[in-house]
Image (cartoon, rainbow, N blue to C red):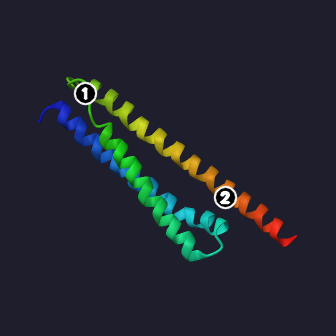
């Protein structure tokens, strides 16, 4: 097997492992935030599952889209450099998505509190 194919396989294995680990972590710990936004546990759990599916679709889709390596890998150094760039991009996207989701959840929570305060008066 040549170095390019090995690099592809390592990229796929590491990326999928990272995506699953981050997805599960966010799913397990995100319920607390969703329960604060949505008053009903059933709705919070449903939204949590939908967020997980969307998370997997976006990240696996990007990983597959980004799979193409533009040149042949001729050395271990080139393999490591290519993997670091590609996996680094996956990690950055995971981080950006995480902070975006947290931002949206806090905005929803803030808006729901404002709505509740307005309806009480």
Instruction: Point out residue 50 in the picture as x, y percentages from the top left corner.
Output: 46, 63
Taking the view exactly as shown, the residue that stands out farthest to the left is 1
Label 1 residue SS: helix
Q: Quadrant of residue 41?
A: bottom right
Q: Residue at x 34, y 42 (%)?
A: 63
Taking the view exactly as shown, the residue that stands out farthest to the right is 121
* Quadrant showing the C terminus: bottom right
* Quadrant showing the N terminus: top left
Q: Earlier in the sequence, mark 1 or mark 2?
A: 1
Pointer 2 residue: 108
Instruction: Point out residue 62 in the picture as x, y percentages from the top left corner.
Output: 37, 42
Pointer 1 residue: 76
Q: Say which of 50 and 84 sits in front.
A: 50
Q: Residue at x 67, y 67 (%)?
A: 36
Q: Residues within 10 Å of mark 2 (few under 14, many from 20)?
A: some
Q: Say which of 25 and 60 sits in front.
A: 60
Instruction: Point out residue 19 in the picture as x, y percentages from the top left corner.
Output: 40, 51
Name above or below for residue 4 compared with residue 12. Answer: above
């Amino acid at each position: 097997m040549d170095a390019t194919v090995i690099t592809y396989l390592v990229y796929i294995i590491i990326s999928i492992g990272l995506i699953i680990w981050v997805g599960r972590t966010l799913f397990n710990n995100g319920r607390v935030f969703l329960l604060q936004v949505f008053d009903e546990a059933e709705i919070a759990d449903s939204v949590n599952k939908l967020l997980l599916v969307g998370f997997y679709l976006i990240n696996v889709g990007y990983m597959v889209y980004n799979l193409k390596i533009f040149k042949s890998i001729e050395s271990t150094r080139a393999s490591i450099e290519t993997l670091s760039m590609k996996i680094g991009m996956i990690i950055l996207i995971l981080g950006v998505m995480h902070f975006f989701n947290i931002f949206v959840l806090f905005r929803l929570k803030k808006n729901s509190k404002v709505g509740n305060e307005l309806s009480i008066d």
